[in-house]
């Protein structure tokens, strides 16, 4: 697993688990949330995002999705936001992430 970034929340870490095809946020060594994806050619399809109940309401899901979208941008790929949470996040942050969405 590739660990790239420590977050401001204690020992929380954001990472792309390429072997598991999901982005994760870990707090205290435990997975607090994840965003599942599939690479489809030049696109990344986000299929499901989940934050464990103990961590809900802390902005962890938003930070996880922002991290994932920034990583997709760095890879040069586009996004297929099948997951409702990811689609809503992109819609709310259209200026920053709207260009990543596959059109058509």
Image (cartoon, rainbow, N blue to C red):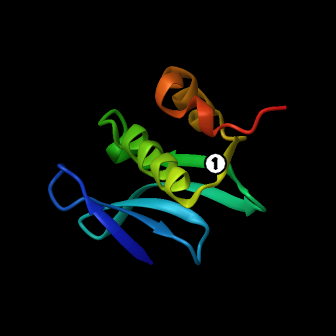
Q: Which residue is mark 1?
A: 48
Front one among 25 and 43? 43
Say few, some or many: other residues with alpha carbon within 10 Å of mark 1 (under 14 / 14 to 19 / 20 or more): some
Q: Quadrant of the C terminus?
A: top right
- Left or right: where does residue 16 sit relative to residue 5? right
Residue ID at (18%, 50%): 9
Q: How many marks?
A: 1
Q: Is residue 40 above or below residue 101?
A: below
Q: Residue at x 78, y 33 (%)?
A: 103
**Res 43 quadrant in image:** bottom right
Q: Image check: 41 left or right of 13?
A: right
Determine the residue positioned at 14% across, 56% down.
Answer: 10
Viewer-closest of 102 and 61: 102
**Which residue appears farthest toward the right when viewing the image?**
104
Q: Nearer the viewer, residue 102 or 53?
A: 102
Looking at the picture, how far across and down is residue 5, in whole percent? 29, 61
Quarter of the rendering containing residue 77: bottom right
Residue 8 in percent (x, y) is at 17, 49
- Report x, y in % for residue 76: 60, 56
- Quarter of the image with the N terminus is bottom left
Tell me where residue 86 appears, x and y as whole percent.
Answer: 58, 37
Is residue 13 positioned above or below 93 on the image?
below
What element does badge 1 sit on? strand
């Amino acid at each position: 697993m590739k660990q790239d970034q420590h977050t401001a929340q204690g020992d929380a870490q954001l990472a792309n688990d390429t072997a598991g095809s999901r982005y994760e946020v870990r707090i205290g060594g435990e997975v607090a949330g994840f965003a599942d994806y599939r690479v489809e050619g030049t696109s990344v399809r986000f299929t499901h995002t989940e934050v464990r109940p103990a961590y809900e309401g802390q902005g962890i899901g938003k930070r996880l999705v922002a991290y994932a979208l920034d990583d997709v941008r760095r890879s040069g790929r586009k996004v297929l936001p099948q997951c409702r949470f990811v689609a809503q996040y992109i819609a709310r942050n259209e200026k920053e992430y709207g260009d990543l969405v596959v059109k058509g």
